[in-house]
Image: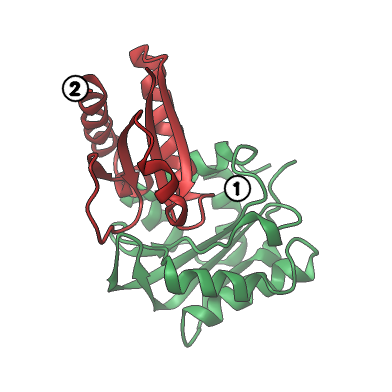
Chain colours: A red, B green
Amino acid sequence: MGKLIVVACGAGINTSTIAEDSIRERMAQEGFADVEVKRILMADIEGYLTRTDLVLIVSMMKIFRTFDVPVIQGMPFLIGSQEEKNVLLNKIVDVVNSK
Amino acid sequence: MTLEFNETLIAFDLQAGDAKEVIDLLAGRMHAQGLVAADYGRQTWEREQHHPTGLPTKPFCIAFPHADAEGVHRSALGVAVMRQPVTFQNMADPDEDLDVSVVFMLANRDPEEQIQTLRNLATLFGQPEKLVELREQSTLLGVASWLRRELRLG
């Protein structure tokens, strides 16, 4: 089965696109052909929680609840140095590998 | 479609009372050029209340306000370099106020189409020395040509 990473932000347009783009690039480098990276509105997250292929939520905003899958704060994709972005991407690779 | 960016979409040495004033000003200039709907500023301000866009960049904070694609006729970038900072809330923590010195308003019609600009913005936001260079520009034309070069805008 494939693996789904959702990237959530407020408008689902600018900030989540930046994170989605970085993650997709790294997934391709890793050769993870079965990983789908999808940007969504945080308001729409409910519809994804029941998906059995969901492995990770990357949120550009603060989250006020807990989920059954890991959540990573994606702000460094927007304002971090290349090194900070790489740390985050390594973490995501680890999550994908562990599922 | 390219990204519309021109001198009239830049506010330099701007004195504004609050964040709403900055958003209204940039959205108003975009609307005057037919780039966004008349209520794009209002929509952006409303979204800012629920999903703030202040970013704790170094060595000063910036903001990245925008609404969804619906009100955008043609993608455009507006920038305000503030004389004194205005308050935005932190995207990562809405309870935290940030003193914002530069506002980047990206009215985006299609994120895929503007992917290179988004990449270039994220690279800029992550480089303190570049942000300092931007704020040290002494004229509006200086800001315009610096942004054109750094963000590789046509």
The residue closer to the viewer here, A49 or A17, is: A49
Q: Classify the position of the N terminus of chain B by image quarter.
A: top right
Measured as percent of width and height from the top left, residue B61 is found at 34, 64
Q: Amino acid at mark 2?
A: Ser
Instruction: State the residue position of label 2.
Output: A98
**Residue B32 lies in quadrant:** bottom right
Instruction: State the residue position of label 1.
Output: B148
Dot 2 falls on a residue whose secondary structure is helix
Is any part of residue B123 visible from this angle? Answer: no
Q: Is residue A80 left or right of residue A25?
A: left
Task: Please determine whether, in this image, residue A7 is positioned above or below residue B134.
Answer: above
Q: Are marks 2 and 1 in contact (CB under 8 Å)?
A: no
The residue closer to the viewer here, B87 or A39, is: A39
Q: Amino acid at mark 1?
A: Arg
Task: Please determine whether, in this image, residue A76 is positioned above or below residue B13.
Answer: above
Measured as percent of width and height from the top left, residue B131 is found at 39, 55
Q: Is residue B71 left or right of residue A24?
A: right
Q: Residue furthest top?
A: A31
